[in-house]
């Protein structure tokens, strides 16, 4: 009999049928035992083979990254190879295995810990990054010593549906979407960056199932219905037939919607509504452009900083320039890095924070690490000469933060001028409105910035005090809470009062059920992942602004979220039935 799980959250839509693959990530046990004299040769051979296998693995990851992302990003792993090929480490390991008769996992782990301890006393970015390399290699070699373990998501070599307790945003970024048909995680919410990445790569995903990964076994046949949020383990023949039909219908609908790509994004009463794309990695520009977007409303630049190493100015400049040229003359809004929260990077890994979402995140991190910030600003400004780039600061909480960030930007501008390096002198500098203080003070901020972009993913979590990636309290995370809607209204009013251009780039901008609500509130620029771009456009093309405003007037008189939800759902259903 089949087992049905339906408590998950759809993170990225699609219907897939395939074999389950349980991915355990990097939780590797480290066995410690003494070997006998006659086992030494065998142990040395085991150690050798694990080293060789790890080298091959790293080379194949490099090839994968070069294919999925870029050659520059694949170079990140060159330092891994250097550590692996270091003769001193290899010799020392052999000596301990032979003389102290310890098993290979034990020896490798002890040597890595010694190395990490001695490097961590040195205050230097280069050595900090090497610590991460060493701990990564340590895990890889140990996992290769224990046969049949998968260490990296890129080791998957067959078509599967991945089940994991959790996946990081960067693990998702390097997935081979030809092999990973879909994924399911126990943890996570709809606006986690893992979910966002799944949408960007168009990999169907269900997150926040609490325990799906412990209910499935490797090679079980599974159906992932990431439209209705259902997972069926070991389906019956009838269920498989039924879902194959759904799958065809879903794909047919997608083809139908694709016909909208080149049609104008305009309401029935001729109001233009701009549709922009959100991107995480430059390789997404093709998908976004093919969906007919009018530029990039949010380039989450932190994804360039991946997991292992920091990109230098030249590499950043090339990536920003590539995207800007691709869209020129359409705008590309580059947001300076937003590390912290659920995006943990090489540089921040060592500083575990008690409340990462309330900690040194986004612009706070940039202002703490001004040298890094300046490198990024220089790269963005230089790239601004090659296209229509706008500069955006994330998580601005106080006006002072904006002034400081702008002053640093102006210093870099002076420096570029003095060196005759061209950049756009009139580059627009705006901010994300994504924390309550910025929303409440949007009238004040509006006097000083060139544009606003509302980040509802964070605004909702901070207004409602609910962790956006937590599956346990996902029921509370609701953009339709009247407190959130009042806040959005306040931001729209402040933007009108100060004539500050306004867009919205949180996930709700790309969800068709919210389109009428956002238009009624006064948003005319929506920035989103490509997932539902065509559906959103279809709604825009079938409504009058007056009916949207009427709906918002009604909502603003309501108190309970469930009442608002019922109204929004009903209006969406009516519209959907009328047009689809
Ligand atoms: C947001 O907070 O809504 C946003 C767009 O930024 P991110 O999801 O990257 O935090
Ligand atoms: Mg945000």
Image (spheres, helix red, strand yellow):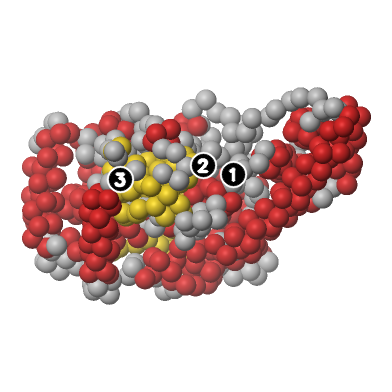
* Residue 260 on image: x %, y %: 24, 71
Crowd band around label 3 with a 10 angstrom C-alpha radius: few (<14), some (14–19), many (20+): many
* Closest to the observer, 136 or 425: 136
* Residue 458 on image: x %, y %: 38, 40
Mark closer to the observer (3, 1): 3
Question: In what element is the residue under mark 3?
Answer: loop
- C-alpha distance separating marks 3 and 1: 26 Å
* Residue 514 on image: x %, y %: 21, 49
Residue position marked by numbered label 1 in the rendering: 150
* Residue 246 on image: x %, y %: 23, 57
- C-alpha distance separating marks 3 and 2: 21 Å
Q: Is residue 206 left or right of residue 84?
A: left
Question: In what element is the residue under mark 2?
Answer: strand
Circle number at residue 235: 3
Residue position marked by numbered label 2 in the rendering: 23
Q: Residue at x 84, y 47 (%)?
A: 86
Q: In which quarter of the view is residue 502 placed?
A: bottom left
Circle number at residue 411: none
Q: Earlier in the sequence, mark 3 or mark 1?
A: 1
Q: Is residue 251 left or right of residue 200?
A: left
């Amino acid at each position: 009999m089949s087992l049905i799980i339906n408590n998950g959250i759809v993170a990225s839509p699609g219907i897939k049928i395939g074999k389950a693959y349980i991915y355990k990530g990097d939780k590797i046990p480290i066995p410690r035992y003494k070997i006998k004299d006659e086992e030494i040769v065998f142990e040395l051979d085991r150690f050798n083979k694990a080293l060789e296998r790890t080298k091959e693995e790293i080379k194949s990851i490099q090839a994968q990254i070069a294919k999925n992302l870029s050659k520059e990003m694949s170079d990140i792993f060159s330092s891994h190879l250097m550590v692996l090929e270091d003769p001193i480490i290899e010799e020392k390991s052999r000596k301990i295995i032979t003389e102290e008769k310890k098993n290979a996992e034990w020896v490798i782990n002890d040597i890595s810990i010694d190395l990490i301890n001695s490097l961590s006393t040195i205050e230097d970015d280069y050595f900090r990054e090497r610590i991460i390399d060493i701990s990564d290699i340590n895990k890889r070699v140990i996992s290769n010593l224990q046969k049949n373990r998968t260490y990296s998501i890129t080791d998957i070599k067959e078509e599967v549906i991945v089940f994991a307790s959790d996946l990081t945003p960067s693990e998702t970024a390097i997935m081979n979407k030809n092999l990973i048909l879909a994924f399911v995680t126990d943890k996570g919410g709809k606006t986690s960056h893992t979910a966002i990445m799944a949408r960007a790569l168009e990999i169907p995903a269900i997150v926040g199932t609490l325990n799906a990964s412990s209910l499935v076994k490797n090679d079980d046949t599974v159906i992932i219905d990431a439209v209705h949020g259902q997972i069926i383990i070991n389906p019956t023949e009838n269920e498989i037939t039924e879902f194959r039909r759904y799958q065809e219908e879903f794909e047919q609908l997608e083809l139908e919607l694709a016909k909208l790509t080149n049609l104008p994004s305009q309401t029935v009463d001729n109001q233009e509504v701009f549709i922009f794309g959100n991107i995480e990695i430059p390789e997404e520009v093709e998908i976004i452009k093919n969906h007919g977007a009018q530029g990039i409303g949010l380039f989450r630049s932190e994804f360039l900083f991946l997991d292992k190493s920091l990109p230098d100015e030249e590499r950043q400049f090339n990536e920003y320039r590539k995207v800007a040229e691709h869209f020129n003359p359409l705008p590309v809004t580059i947001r300076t890095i937003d590390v912290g929260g659920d995006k943990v990077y090489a540089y921040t890994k060592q500083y575990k924070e008690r409340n990462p979402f309330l900690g040194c995140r986004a612009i706070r991190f940039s202002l703490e690490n001004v040298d890094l910030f300046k490198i990024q600003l220089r790269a963005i400004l230089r790239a601004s000469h090659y296209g229509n780039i706008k500069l955006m600061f994330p998580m601005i909480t106080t006006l002072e933060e904006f002034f400081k960030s702008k002053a640093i930007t102006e210093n870099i501008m002076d420096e570029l001028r003095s060196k005759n390096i061209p950049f756009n002198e009139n580059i627009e500098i705006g901010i994300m409105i994504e924390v309550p203080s910025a929303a409440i003070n949007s009238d004040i901020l509006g006097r000083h910035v060139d544009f606003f972009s509302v980040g509802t993913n964070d605004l909702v979590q901070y207004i409602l005090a609910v962790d956006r990636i937590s599956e346990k309290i996902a029921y509370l995370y609701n953009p339709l809470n009247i407190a959130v809607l009042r806040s959005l209204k306040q931001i729209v009013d402040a933007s009108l009062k100060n004539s500050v251009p306004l867009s919205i780039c949180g996930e709700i901008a790309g969800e068709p059920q919210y389109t009428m609500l956002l238009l009624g509130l006064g948003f005319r620029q929506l920035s989103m992942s490509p997932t539902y771009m065509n559906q959103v456009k279809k709604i825009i093309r079938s409504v009058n602004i007056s009916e949207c405003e009427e709906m918002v007037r009604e909502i603003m008189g309501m108190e309970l979220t469930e009442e608002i939800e019922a109204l929004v759902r009903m209006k969406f259903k009516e519209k959907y039935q009328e047009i689809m």
